[in-house]
Amino acid sequence: MKHLIIPVLIILMLSCNSRKGEMKTGENISDSVSENLYSRLFTVSHEENFTRMTITSPWQGSGDIALDYFLLPDSGRIPDGADPAMVIRTPVSRVVCMSTTHVAMISRLGFTSTIKAVSGPGYISDKQLLSMISEGSVADIGYDSNINSELIVSLEPDVVLVYGVGAESAGYLSKIRDSGIPLLYISDYLENDPLARAEWLRVFGFLYEKEDEADRIFENIAAEYELLKQEVAWRLNNLPVVMTGLPYKDTWYISPGNSYIGQLISDAGGKYLWSDRRSASAIPMSLESVYVKAHNADIWINSGSAESLDDIVSVDTRLGDLKPVKTGRVFNNNARQLPGGGNDYWEKGVLEPHVLLLDLISVFHPGLVPDNIICYYRRLEWKER
């Protein structure tokens, strides 16, 4: 089988017009909308004296809730009727990150030095930021309900980038909001399309007044992803059946077919075992029911915390009877995991869906791309066999 042609540097760019229209006059009248290519959860419109950013479904289960933020320079006048707590002065120079994906976005634009605090430094993979944490120039603000609000306020950040997994997050963050520090909800993790998640880089472009650079970077990512996707769809007929996950206390949380990983599997030329299931969240199933259906699987990916095939059968010996275990076709997304627990798959990987796609193409279709280019995945082996 012939290899795909994988350029070292992507030359193809999306042919599209600039998202930014010419500014017009008129008080508080929307002059142009910065259109997204994939994301459905944020919109940006340029108005006469400010930029309005709207985040829809800011946290899991928030439905149609929409939050309006007003981005304007230090000298800009706050728009009439705007909540001062929703005003972000740009470009930001001091930020607090509550998710590793925020770190990846900021780092890609070259502003790692603006990060003043993170939530859970043990999960960070970025080398520059790890060095800053080690030197003591980046604080640890805690996690979830143990967030150190007083520490955050003392750091006087321009914005706190929030990862909200439920309505309860709005409660324990209220002290920060009441202090006048804006909380910007980054809900990239709720996007089901891999390119939609990566497109949140554009949000960071607006925060740092680097819109054009963020657009250029994202367009290159999207172009390479779409090119790979088209090549795979054109070349392949037989699709391997793919299973994911690992049970926890006899419950197997299944990602539905309309999920982020479901989309990646499909685009990489795989047939997801649960492609027919639709849900807004992971589906809990019994180990027995998954075991029965998984006998049809050819490949097993994203196998939880497993470091070896021994780890998988230690969960339940019956899992050793599954075809992917017997044939050695179990691949986990922890090739770039650090000893402290940080996994670059959940940091930089979110901003590199084209690399994740290439990894999965290599896993699903050996020989279609060079084997030595795999980045975020690794094949699990037996420890002593």
Image (cartoon, rainbow, N blue to C red):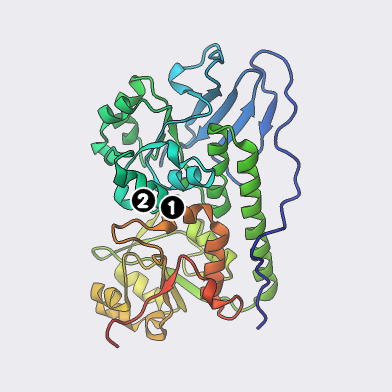
Seen in the picture, residue 168 relative to 178 is either above or below; the reply is: below
Which badge, 2 or 1, comes first in the chain's sequence? 2
SS for tag 2? loop
In what quadrant of the picture does the C terminus appear?
A: bottom left
Q: Residue furthest front?
A: 135
- Residue in the foreground of this view, choosing between 53 and 94: 94
Residue 145 lies, with reference to residue 71, above or below; the image says below
What amino acid is found at the position of numbered circle 1 in the picture? Glu
Look at the numbered discs 2 and 1 and tell me whether their residues touch, using CB distance below 8 Å: yes
Image location (x, y in percent) of residue 377:
45, 68
Q: Is 34 on the left or on the right of 252, as rendered?
A: right
Q: Quadrant of residue 268?
A: bottom right
* Residue under numbered circle 2: 124
Q: Residue at x 47, y 37 (%)?
A: 57
Please give the residue where the numbered disc 1 appears in the rendered image.
347
Q: Bin the neighbour count of mark 1 within 10 Å (Cα to Cα): few under 14, some 14-19, many 20 and up.
A: many
Question: Rounded to the nearest whole Å, what is the CA distance between mark 2 and mark 1?
Answer: 8 Å
Instruction: Tell me the residue at 54%/39% (across/down).
Output: 41
Whether residue 381 appears in this view of the structure is yes
Which quadrant would the N terminus be assigned to in this image?
Answer: bottom right
Q: Residues within 10 Å of mark 2 (few under 14, many from 20)?
A: many
Question: Label 1's element?
Answer: loop
Q: Residue furthest bottom?
A: 385
When asked about the image quadrant of residue 203, the answer is: top right
- The count of marks equals 2
Q: Is residue 352 above or below residue 51?
A: below
User: Along the line of sight, which residue is nearer the eye, 360 or 55?
Assistant: 360
Under mark 2, the amino acid is Ile
Q: Is residue 126 visible?
A: no
